Image: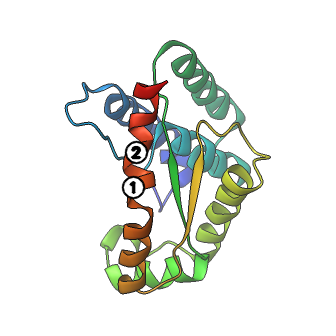
């Protein structure tokens, strides 16, 4: 996908949308379901980035968008809270290099900057797409110990988000 986004973008994002749909609709066993990403971020960030960068043809973008719109209208893919770990592209790039994942070695800083810009437009400025839930912003350009403290400080708000719908 990273080596030839124009060729593999639609294939990869169709599969992502399918797997996200599966995650959203699985029977919920525990009181809280946490997902690293959602069907909303897959469409509003990653599909949007492929389209804006010219690596996804208009026809593919329209088809994926129409599938997404159909899913949102016909299937419960709601989320109770988005936790935005707001991190600079430079910090993301450094962390990416430290992880040393083979498939990530060719990701340029410019890609991370584009993704960051879309997240800012969507979740902070709220000008890109409708935000499907409240957003908790955690400034994540921090070391691991500071991040653990920030998580702990926000734990109740994060874990209580799923309970909100049960109390309405």
Q: Which residue is mark 2?
A: 160
Point 49% across, 24% down: residue: 168
Q: Quadrant of residue 28?
A: top left
Point 65% across, 70% down: residue: 113
Residue 84: image x %, image y %?
54, 59
Residue 139: tell me if it is visible.
yes
Q: Quadrant of residue 115?
A: bottom right
> Label 2 to label 1, Cα distance in Å?
6 Å
Residue 123: image x %, image y %?
66, 52
Point 39% across, 30% down: residue: 18
Q: Which of the pair 160/126 is nearer the observer?
A: 160
Horizontally, residue 8 falls left or right of residue 31, namely right
Residue 144: image x %, image y %?
36, 83
Residue 36: tell me if it is visible.
no
Query: Given the current orientation, which residue lies at the most extreme top position?
Result: 74
Q: Which of the pair 12/76 is nearer the observer?
A: 76
Horizontally, residue 163 falls left or right of residue 58, namely left
* Mark 2 vs 1: CB contact within 8 A: yes
Q: Which residue is mark 1?
A: 156
13 to 101, vertically: above or below: above
44 to 114, vertically: above or below: above
Q: Which of the pair 20/134 is nearer the observer?
A: 134
Secondary structure under tag 2 reads helix
Residue 87: image x %, image y %?
56, 73
Horizontally, residue 123 falls left or right of residue 14, namely right
Q: Quadrant of residue 76?
A: top left
Mark 2 surroundings within 10 Å by alpha-carbon count, few (fewer than 14), some (14 through 19), many (20 or more):
some
Q: Which mark is residue 49?
A: none
Point 44% across, 42% down: residue: 161
């Amino acid at each position: 996908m990273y080596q030839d986004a124009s060729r593999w973008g639609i294939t990869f994002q169709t599969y992502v949308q399918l797997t996200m749909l599966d995650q959203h609709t699985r029977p919920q066993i525990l009181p809280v379901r946490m997902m690293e990403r959602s069907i909303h971020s897959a469409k509003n960030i990653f599909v949007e980035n492929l389209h804006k960068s010219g690596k996804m043809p208009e026809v593919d973008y329209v088809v994926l968008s129409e599938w997404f719109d159909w899913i949102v209208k016909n299937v419960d893919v709601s989320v109770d809270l988005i936790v935005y770990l707001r991190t600079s592209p430079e910090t993301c790039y450094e962390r990416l290099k430290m992880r040393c994942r083979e498939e990530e070695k060719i990701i340029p800083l410019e890609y991370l900057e584009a993704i960051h810009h879309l997240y800012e437009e969507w979740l902070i400025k709220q000008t890109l797409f409708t935000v499907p839930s409240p957003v908790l912003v955690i400034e994540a350009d921090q070391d691991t110990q500071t991040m653990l403290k920030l998580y702990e400080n926000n734990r109740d708000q994060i874990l209580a988000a799923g309970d909100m719908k049960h109390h309405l």
